[in-house]
Every structure is written in structure tokens, then in C-alpha cells.
Image (cartoon, helix red, strand yellow):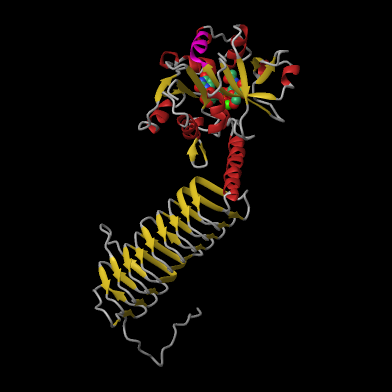
């Protein structure tokens, strides 16, 4: 929709957050509040996205340096109307959509309800049980909204109104500019209120409409940490319900966190306490046990991720069993039927079909073939303090427990490394490598005893 500009208000300090960070940079579902609002703005394909910044604006501008948005400074935060007025020269489209940087959950369908209306002003309102803190919508006898009264300026009658202003408006730009040029601050806070727009438009005989958001929490503003935490739970519950609707089994929709996107194939099940970050893909019949963290990874069909595992930047193949307590780090790729057991850390390694590392190991910068068995306590010594080196375990290798593989090193196909070995040289295929000292026995050995003084 090229005949619309979006203005996002983000200049306020957010005093009630009690933080040194600007309010709009606080995170909801892993993204800043402002990220959410910018995304909502982009969905209607506007001519311009203008962000009004003030408090800590350098930090915000730097964060969005690569983003095609226009920043406008509001040096003093004199109110929401004053904030929009700073953008007046940038408003060149027929309509202007105003979004608040601290109302992050606004959805595309709700925004479209505003932008598709022909009214001169359309405001997104909502009827709530507890309207405290919000501006109240006052309607004339005709039913048309005639003004918005801020809580501090409202008389008891007005305070009892449960229809609130979400702060989101779509306005005819010519009308908006007329209003901004006539802005006043004759209210209890001495601020230039954007909300006076409704009375201004009503007095001019302009058409005013209201629309409502699709979801109840969508218009919740974030003014405090408590509201942020509440909104996070609403948002997460909605994401969980969408997954449930798509056929995912979720043990408790109140105990899952998605900070990014998750794509699930059929018959996926997710137990409690799991966190998904970035882009996560779960294949058919994948089972995620409790308290698993998965970030930017793909898990292929029929794989189980057991409890307390941590997976990042990995491609986990099908029919794998990972964990419990496994740590899989970026650059890991496992093929089918791989087993990574408890307290095994894997980094930047590929693991071939049917290979196993079941207990207590570090596998870093390794290329592991198929049907390899990595014994408990095996360590790839991949780092000499300056450089990283590769370990290669060819097909059917068996590494005995408590082995150190000092990279770069290659263990040839089918070879066995005896338990407790420190391997510093390549091992040819098909034999046994053993580097530990021979066992001896001292028959008359006496343990040292404590002398009593
Ligand atoms: C505002 C509305 C209220 C509405 C509520 C919805 C006004 C006067 N009140 O109240 O009717 O119910 O939002 O959440 O508009 N900002 C600036 N510059 C300023 C002041 C604010 O950029 O000078 C920005 C803030 O950073 C914030 C947004 O505008 O992102 C809203 O400001 P805030 O002070 O939180 O307004 P509310 O009191 O919540
Ligand atoms: Ca607010």
C-alpha cells in the first residue's frame, strides 16, 4: 500500500521500566519491542516507516543502521502528539498509520482493518475489564467516538468507561497535519496528546470510526516489567495454541518459549520447559523431552532429543537419539541413526550413519564415518592454544574409553584404539593402536600411613 506512511513512536524513556535501556529495546519473544512493531509496519508495505526517537536514540539508531527506516528526533518528549508532529515534513502519503513502539503484538489483520477503512480517522479500540492506565473512548449520542480522555484527565464517569484507546490510529494525512499544527497541551500532564486528534476531527465533522483487534492481548502496552512479562506469556500461549492447532503435541502450552520461528512436521511432540530460538525445524515424529534448548537447528524425522539437551546451529539427522544432557554446538551434522549420549559435547563435526558417542566426550572439528563407536571419556584435542585441527575417524573405528586424539590425526577404517591411549600419530586401517604403559604389579606395596605425633 504505497499511499500510506507509518509513524512509530519510540522516543519515550519508559521510566516505569526502571532500566537504563530504552523501553522499545526490551525484548519480547527474543526480539526488541521495536522489532515487532517495525515488522507489523512492513506487512502493509508502506511508502515510509518513520521512527520517532529521543531517549537513548543513538543506541536505537545504531541498532537499526542497516534497516530501511527513517529516524526523526524528538529532542524533548513533550507527548505523543508532539512526537508525531516531529515527522510532519516526512508525511507525504494520503494516509498515515501511527503505531506505538511499546505496543508490540499488533497483528497484520488488525492493522489492515484500519488501513482498509475510508474514514478520515480510524482508531483501534478495545473493551477491557481493567481500563486503568489507558485513554478512554468517549462516544457521542450518535455512537461516533467524539474524544479520548486520558486517565489523569478523566472524571469518575469517564473513568468507568471500559473501551480504551490502543494508541493505534490511521488518519487522513491532510487532517493529521491540520491537527498537529493546532496542538495544545492544556491537560493535567501539560503534554501534547495525540489522543486530542479525535475531538479535533469530531469538531471538524470528519468521519471517525473504530475497529477492534483480533486478539485480546494484542493492544496491551508495555509500561513496566510486569506488563512485559504478562505480555510475553500471552504471546507465547498464542504461539503454542497455533502449534497445537497445526497438530503438534505440547505437554503444557504455558510452559514453552518460542523466540523466533519454529516449523513442525506431523506428529511432533514437545514436553515442558523447552526453548526454541532463531529458526528451528522439527521433522516428522520428532520428540523433544523436557527442558531442551534448540537454537537455529534442524532435527530430521523420527529423532528424539532427550531431556536437558542444548542444540545450536546443527543439522540432526533422522532416527537419532540425542541426550539427555547433550551439548551440540554450531557446525554439527549427524546422519541417520546416530546416538549422542549424556555429557557429550560436539562442535563443528560430521557424524556418519549409525555412529555413537554415548557418554562423557568432547568431539570437536571431527569427521566421523559410519558405525563408529566413540568410548566414554574420549577427547579430541583439537586446539593447541593457537590453531584448531581436524580429527578423522573412518568407518567402523572403535575408540576405547578415556582416549585422547591429538589432532590433526586420522584413525583408519576398522581400527581399534585401546582404552586410555593418547594418540598423536595417524593409525592405519584394520589394526589396534595402543599407547598406554604396560600394566605391572608390585606385590609388597604398602600404602603410606599417617604418623601419629
Ligand atoms: C498512550 C495513550 C493512551 C493509550 C495508551 C495505549 C496518549 C496521550 N495516550 O498512553 O490513550 O491508551 O498509549 O498504550 O497518547 N512517546 C514518544 N514521545 C513522547 C511521549 C511518548 O515518542 O513525547 C512514545 C513512547 O516512547 C511510547 C508511546 O509513545 O512508545 C506511548 O507513550 P506512553 O507514555 O507509554 O503513553 P501511555 O501513557 O501508555
Ligand atoms: Ca504506553
Q: Is 258 situated left or right of 137 in this image?
A: left
Q: Residue at x 34, y 62 (%)?
A: 349
Which residue is at the front of the view, 25 or 220? 220
Q: Is residue 32 visible?
A: yes
Q: Nearer the viewer, residue 88 or 187?
A: 88
Q: Main secondary structure of the magenta part?
A: helix
Residue 352, image x, y percentages: 36, 68
Horizontal and vertical percent position of residue 111: 54, 28
Residue 79 appears in the rendering = no
Q: Quadrant of residue 138?
A: top right
Please identify the quarter of the rendering in which residue 145 is found: top right
| Quadrant of the image containing the N terminus | top left
Query: Residue 304 at x, y = what percent?
Result: 51, 63
Please determine whether, in this image, residue 149 is positioned above or below residue 333.
above
- Of residues 150 and 302, the one nearer the viewer is 302
Residue 416, image quadrant:
bottom left
Vertical position of residue 419 compared to residue 306: above or below: below
Whether the magenta-drawn stretch holds residue 173 is answered as: yes
Q: Is residue 58 left or right of residue 79?
A: left
**Where in the figure is residue 132, as x and y percent of width and height?**
68, 26
Which stretch is magenta?
Answer: 172-178
Who's the residue at 55% across and 58% down the image? 267
Q: Quadrant of ligand 1?
A: top right
Query: Magenta stretch: residue 392 in it?
Result: no
Amino acid at each position: 500500500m504505497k499511499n500510506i506512511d507509518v509513524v512509530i513512536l519510540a522516543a519515550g524513556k519508559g521510566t516505569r521500566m526502571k532500566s537504563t535501556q530504552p523501553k522499545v529495546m526490551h525484548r519480547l519473544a527474543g526480539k526488541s519491542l521495536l522489532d515487532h512493531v517495525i515488522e507489523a509496519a512492513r506487512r502493509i508495505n508502506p511508502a515510509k516507516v518513520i521512527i520517532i526517537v529521543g531517549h537513548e536514540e543513538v543506541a536505537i539508531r545504531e541498532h537499526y543502521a542497516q534497516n530501511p527506516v527513517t529516524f526523526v528526533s524528538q529532542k524533548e518528549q513533550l507527548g505523543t502528539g508532539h512526537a508525531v508532529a516531529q515527522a510532519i515534513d516526512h508525511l507525504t502519503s494520503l494516509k498515515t498509520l501511527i503505531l506505538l513502539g511499546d505496543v508490540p503484538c499488533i497483528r497484520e489483520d488488525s492493522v489492515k482493518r484500519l488501513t482498509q477503512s475510508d474514514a478520515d480517522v480510524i482508531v483501534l479500540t478495545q473493551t477491557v475489564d481493567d481500563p486503568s492506565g489507558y485513554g478512554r473512548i468517549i462516544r457521542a449520542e450518535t455512537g461516533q467516538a467524539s474524544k479520548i480522555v486520558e486517565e489523569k484527565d478523566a472524571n469518575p464517569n469517564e473513568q468507568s468507561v471500559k473501551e480504551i484507546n490502543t494508541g493505534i490510529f490511521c488518519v487522513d494525512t491532510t487532517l493529521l497535519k491540520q491537527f498537529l499544527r493546532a496542538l495544545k497541551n492544556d491537560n493535567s500532564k501539560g503534554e501534547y496528546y495525540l489522543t486530542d486528534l479525535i475531538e479535533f476531527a469530531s469538531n471538524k465533522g470528519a468521519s471517525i470510526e473504530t475497529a477492534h483487534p483480533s486478539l485480546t492481548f494484542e493492544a496491551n502496552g508495555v509500561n513496566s516489567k510486569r506488563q512485559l512479562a504478562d505480555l510475553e506469556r500471552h504471546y507465547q500461549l498464542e504461539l503454542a495454541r497455533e502449534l497445537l492447532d497445526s497438530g503438534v503435541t505440547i505437554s503444557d502450552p504455558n510452559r514453552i518459549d518460542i523466540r523466533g520461528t519454529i516449523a513442525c512436521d506431523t506428529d511432533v511432540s514437545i514436553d515442558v520447559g523447552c526453548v526454541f530460538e532463531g529458526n528451528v525445524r522439527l521433522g516428522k515424529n520428532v520428540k523433544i523431552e523436557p527442558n531442551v534448548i534448540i537454537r537455529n537447528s534442524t532435527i530430521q524425522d523420527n529423532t528424539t532429543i532427550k531431556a536437558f539437551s542444548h542444540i545450536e546451529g546443527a543439522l540432526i539427522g533422522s532416527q537419532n537419539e540425542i541426550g539427555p544432557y547433550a551439548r551440540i554446538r554450531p557446525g554439527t551434522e549427524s546422519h541417520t541413526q546416530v546416538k549422542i549420549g549424556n555429557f557429550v559435547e560436539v562442535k563443528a563435526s560430521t557424524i556418519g550413519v549409525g555412529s555413537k558417542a554415548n557418554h562423557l566426550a568432547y568431539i570437536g572439528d571431527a569427521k566421523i564415518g559410519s558405525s563408529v563407536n566413540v568410548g566414554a571419556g574420549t577427547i579430541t584435542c583439537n586446539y593447541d592454544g593457537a590453531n584448531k585441527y581436524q580429527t578423522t575417524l573412518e568407518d567402523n573405528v572403535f575408540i576405547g574409553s578415556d582416549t585422547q586424539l591429538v589432532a590433526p590425526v586420522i584413525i583408519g577404517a576398522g581400527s581399534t584404539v585401546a582404552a586410555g591411549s593418547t594418540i598423536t600419530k595417524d593409525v592405519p586401517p584394520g589394526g589396534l593402536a595402543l599407547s598406554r604403559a604396560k600394566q605391572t604389579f608390585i606385590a609388597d606395596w604398602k600404602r603410606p600411613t599417617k604418623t601419629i605425633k
